[in-house]
Amino acid sequence: RTHNVHIDNRNRTSVTGVSDVESFNEQEIILETEAGGLRIEGEGLHLSKLNLDDGQVVIEGEVLSLEYEPAVPERRPGL
């Protein structure tokens, strides 16, 4: 799956390539995406669409910031 983020006027955000929603409230949404963890901060945030089968999330509310978490390297057994 490809990962994309599209923001319309800071009030509607579409994210693809989402594998999990780790947490959400009106100020912060944390997603696990194909590109790693993604933290979205804002005001009045809510998930208006959630389809993890298709990897699609649509968020409504004012977006103040987006931040990707650093990728954590996979540990191989025996090392």
Image: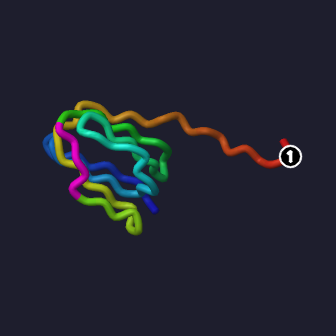
On the rendered structure, is 74 left or right of 15? right
Tag 1 residue: 78
Crowd rating for badge 1 (residues with CA inside 10 Å; few <14, some 14–19, many 20+): few
Residue 18, image x, y percentages: 41, 55
Residue 28, image x, y percentages: 31, 36
Q: Is residue 8 magenta?
A: no
Q: Residue at x 61, y 38 (%)?
A: 72
Q: Which residues are magenta?
A: 44-48
Relative vertical location of residue 78 with respect to residue 1 in this rendering, above or below = above
Q: Residue at x 73, y 44 (%)?
A: 75
Q: Main secondary structure of the magenta part?
A: strand
In terms of secondary structure, where does tag 1 sit?
Answer: loop
Residue 67, image x, y percentages: 39, 34
Q: Is residue 46 magenta?
A: yes
Residue 12, image x, y percentages: 18, 48
Type of the residue with mark 1: Gly
Which residue occupies the foreground of this view, 39 or 25? 25
Relative vertical location of residue 27 with respect to residue 4 in this rendering, above or below = above
The furthest residue to the bottom: 53
Q: Residue at x 48, y 35 (%)?
A: 69
The furthest residue to the top: 64
Task: Give the quadrant of the C terminus.
Answer: top right
Give the tally of numbered discs: 1
The colour scheme used to paint the residues is: rainbow
On the rendered structure, is 27 left or right of 33? left
